[in-house]
Image (cartoon, rainbow, N blue to C red):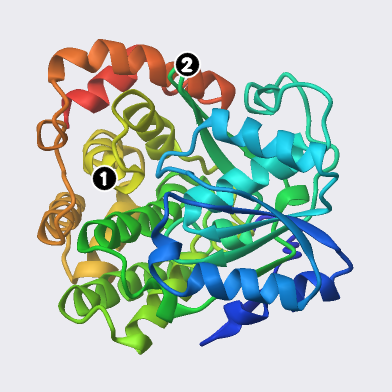
Amino acid sequence: MNDFTYYNPTKIEFGKGKEKNIGKYIKDSGYESVLLVYGTGSIKKSSLYDDTIASLKEAGLKYEELSGIVSNPLISKVRDGIKIAKDNKLQAVLGVGGGSVADSVKAIAAGAKYDGDVWDFFIQKAVIKEALPVFTVMTLAATASEMNGNAVITNELTQQKFSIGTVLVNPVLSVINPELMATVSKDYLAYSAVDAIAHTIEVYFTATEHPKFNSRLVEAIIKTIMETTEILIKDPNDYEARGDFAWAATQALNGLTTSGTHGGNFPNHMIEHTLSALYNVPHGAGLSIVIPAWMKWYKEQNTAQFERFAKEIFGLSTADEGINELESWFSKIGSPVTLDQAGISKDDIDKMAENAVQTSKLWGLEENYNEQTIKDILHKA
């Protein structure tokens, strides 16, 4: 096991009705004003918006609102939020929604304490040194953004989808109430499952050192996600399955599965960000296309771990069997596994590779994932 430091400052409030206390949680943390950020209106169709506003008012908090966050969140909206936060001298940011909302509030939190353009952080022109405190109420389990310092934002003008990562934007507190996730569509349940699985298997396969405990933890998360996804497709209101799914998704990317590992990276996410940036493909749908293609390309570089995956997850023997079974499962739950199924032409592979290599360079992966290599992977999709 490699040496490591593990620190996660986020407090989780998990359970029924806890979103109604969000105002108190913010107030008890020492803040008097907040920017409320949410999506395109779904929280207003339920009681969640009204409950949130009532909670903020009951706590005596001053608040401003920013709505309209979309599934692949945009830098233009982040800039709008930063202006509101600065103009009103707000002390904190609250995101109510899924991973896109959580990512947006993190970027807003960082940008609100910076004199330049927030995109500087995403292109590594500047380093985040401070941020407003972040709070979240989650309505979707997928990204683990409720318990990490990562945020991914799309620049719609440059067609770049880049990320930031710092503990400074870890949420102070996040509310996870599985009941709030019961209205998630079957499509987005499938995409969420793929995303959670992707968060665990990338380092699982690419790390040069991956302790047995971590492998077993990854496998437990994957099996939990798969089992509960199938239950929830049949019965979206199964609270126990919804709770297991939500907590497993959080654990997939809160730093625990990668502690003690060495040399791992996230090439599937690196390539998928291009699909989202260029074609606005839902992130999980893009991952279910990229992952099997990448696995077929990469398998011989870590055959033992691929064989372990096949045995522990599916009870099979070979790397190819495990890859094919995972690809079949993605199809079974309704997530695309080819570019064609997502309406993306293979004629665009050169264009996609040219875009993806920008992220590869930013992430320090260009030595292994140059433009030609990315083309080779995409051709397998």
Q: Residue at x 79, y 21 (%)?
A: 116
Tell me where residue 165 sits by quadrant: top right
Residue 70 image position (x, y, % from top left): 42, 43
* Residue linked to disc 2: 157
- How many numbered marks appear? 2
Regarding residue 292, the answer to whether it shows in the image is yes
Q: Can residue 165 be seen in this view?
A: no
Q: Which mark is residue 25?
A: none
Give the quarter of the figure containing the C terminus: top left
- Which x, y percent locates residue 91? 84, 53
- Name the amino acid type tagged 2: Leu
Q: 101 or 321: nearer the eye? A: 101
Residue visible at 48% across and 44% down in the picture: 69
Q: Is residue 109 left or right of residue 352?
A: right
45 horizontally vs 143: left or right: left
Q: Which amino acid does label 1 sit on?
A: Ala
**Mark 1 or mark 2, which is nearer to you?**
2
Q: What secondary structure is found at the residue carrying circle 1?
A: helix
Above or below, 311 against 102 in this view is below
Which residue corresponds to mark 1? 285
- Secondary structure beneath disc 2? loop
